[in-house]
Amino acid sequence: MRVAVDLDDVLADLISHLLATHEKICGERLTREQAVRWDVFPPEVHDHVRFGGGYATLEPLPGTHDFLQWLNQGHEVNIVTYRGGHARDITVDWLDRHFPHLYDAVHLTGGGKVDTCRELGVGLIIDDSYNQIPAVTSALGIPGILIDTPMNRHIEESDLIRRAENLAQARRIIETECLLHP
C-alpha cells in the first residue's frame, strides 16, 4: 500500500523550533499549548525557519526512525509535505541524513495534498494538519491518522480520521484497525 506521511510535526519537530525562534526574534516565550494557530507566530518567525536555514536544524521527533522502518516493510512510504519547491534540497538532505532508505519519494506540494495523494493512489495518510487530513480523507475516502497538536484539537475523530498522540500510538491504531493492506 502507498502511504502519505507528513514531515513537519509528524517526523520533524517544527513547533519547538518555531517556539525557540519566536522567543529569539520577538523576546516573548510561548508554550506549545499557546500555539493554536499558525498566525500566533509573526511572518518574520516563519520566514526565518523557511528561508533562514531553520528546516536543516530540526530534530526528528521521538520514535520516527522505528516507525518509518516498520512502515517501510512492505509499503511504499511517500513523504508528502506542504513545504514549497524552494525547500526541496534542504528537505531531501534532512530526510537522507535522518532516515536514509526509509522512504520511497518526497513530494513538496506547496499547498493542498489532495491532488498529490490522488495521483499517488495513497491508501492512508498520516498528518498533523487540521486542513489536510479532513480534505484528503473525505476527497479520497481513505483513512487518516491525525497526529495530535494544539492546532488540530478541534478536529473530531470519525470513521476515517483517528487521532494519535505520537507515531508509536499511530502504529498501534494502524495495526489494531488493520488500516494497511498490501
Image (cartoon, rainbow, N blue to C red):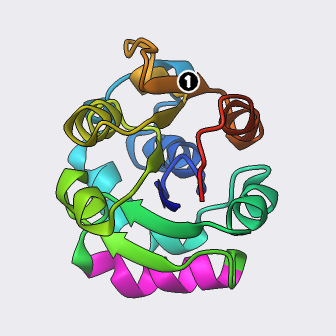
- Please state the horizontal and vertical placement of residue 139, each as a whole percent of the image: 20, 38
Q: Give the range drawn in magenta.
A: 86-97
| Residue 112 in view in this figure | no
Left or right of 35 on screen, residue 173: right
Find disc 1 in the rendering and name its residue.
163
Residue at 30% from the left image edge and 70% from the top image edge: 108
Q: Residue furthest front?
A: 182
Q: Is mark 1 on a helix, strand or loop?
A: strand
Residue at 35% from the left image edge and 82% from the top image edge: 88
- Name the one closer to the observer, 109 or 144: 144
| Residue 13 in view in this figure | yes
- Tell me if residue 137 comes above or below residue 10 in the rendering: above
- Please state the horizontal and vertical placement of residue 132, each as a whole percent of the image: 29, 40
Q: Main secondary structure of the magenta part?
A: helix
Quadrant of the frame with the C terminus: bottom right
For label 1, the crowd category at 10 Å Cα-Cα, with few meaning under 14, some 14 to 19 and many 20 or more, is many
Which amino acid type is shown beneath numbered disc 1?
Arg
Residue at 67% from the left image edge and 61% from the top image edge: 59
Quadrant in the picture for residue 109 = bottom left
- Residue 95 magenta-highlighted: yes
- Tell me if residue 27 comes above or below residue 64 in the rendering: above
Quadrant in the picture for residue 153 = top left
